Amino acid sequence: QVQLVESGGGLVQPGGSLRLSCAASGSIFSIYDMGWYRQAPGKQRELVATITDGGMTTYADSVKGRFAISRDNAKNTVHLQMNSLKPEDTAVYYCASRLGTGWITKGAQYWGQGTQVTVSS
């Protein structure tokens, strides 16, 4: 079992930045692949970014060049740095984890409770 707790959401103006954090507990953090999803009102949940246990990253086309995922295995945390934010980035952001590959075919195994990000002037 893995417990995930997100923090860092809030209200930001277009063009601004936010850094989301996710604290993990309950298992050996370093062996899990980590990811961030988001879900906007009336839309399907979207996989935004992933990072493997070895540090390899992937991004949705909609956030490439603006978002960066990173992890600190010593602190059992994963971060999502979000820059050049747009109103369409407004969503609830969820931290997630899974063992090994399969984000697209199998989805996440563990979820956080979500944190709201609102991009508005």
Image (cartoon, helix red, strand yellow):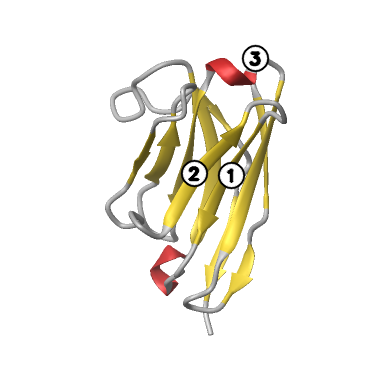
Circle 1 is placed at which residue position?
Answer: 79
Q: Exactly how many numbered labels are in the figure?
A: 3
Tag 1 and tag 3, C-beta contact below 8 Å:
no
Tag 1 and tag 2, C-beta contact below 8 Å:
yes
At label 1, which amino acid type do we have? His
Pick whichever of labels 2 and 3 is earlier in the sequence.
3
Q: Is residue 5 left or right of residue 116?
A: right
Quick check: 121 above or below 115?
Answer: below
Pick whichever of labels 1 and 2 is earlier in the sequence.
2
Quick check: 48 above or below 40?
Answer: above
At label 2, which amino acid type do we have? Ile
Marks 1 and 3 sit apart, C-alpha to C-alpha, by 17 Å
Circle 3 is placed at which residue position?
Answer: 28
At label 3, which amino acid type do we have? Ile
Q: Position of residue 79 (x, y in %)?
A: 58, 44
Q: Residue at x 54, y 54 (%)?
A: 81
Circle 2 is placed at which residue position?
Answer: 69
Q: Is residue 59 left or right of residue 76?
A: left
Marks 2 and 3 sit apart, C-alpha to C-alpha, by 19 Å
Q: Residue at x 54, y 48 (%)?
A: 80
Crowd around label 1: few <14 · some 14–19 · many ≥20 (10 Å): many
Element type where label 2 sits in the image: strand
Q: Is residue 1 visible?
A: no
Q: Position of residue 14 (x, y in %)?
A: 48, 78
Q: Position of residue 90 (x, y in %)?
A: 48, 65
Q: Nearer the viewer, residue 35 or 51?
A: 51
Quick check: 12 above or below 80?
Answer: below
Tag 2 and tag 3, C-beta contact below 8 Å:
no
Q: Which image quadrant: the N terminus?
A: top right
Which of the 4 image quadrants contains residue 112?
Answer: top right
Crowd around label 3: few <14 · some 14–19 · many ≥20 (10 Å): few
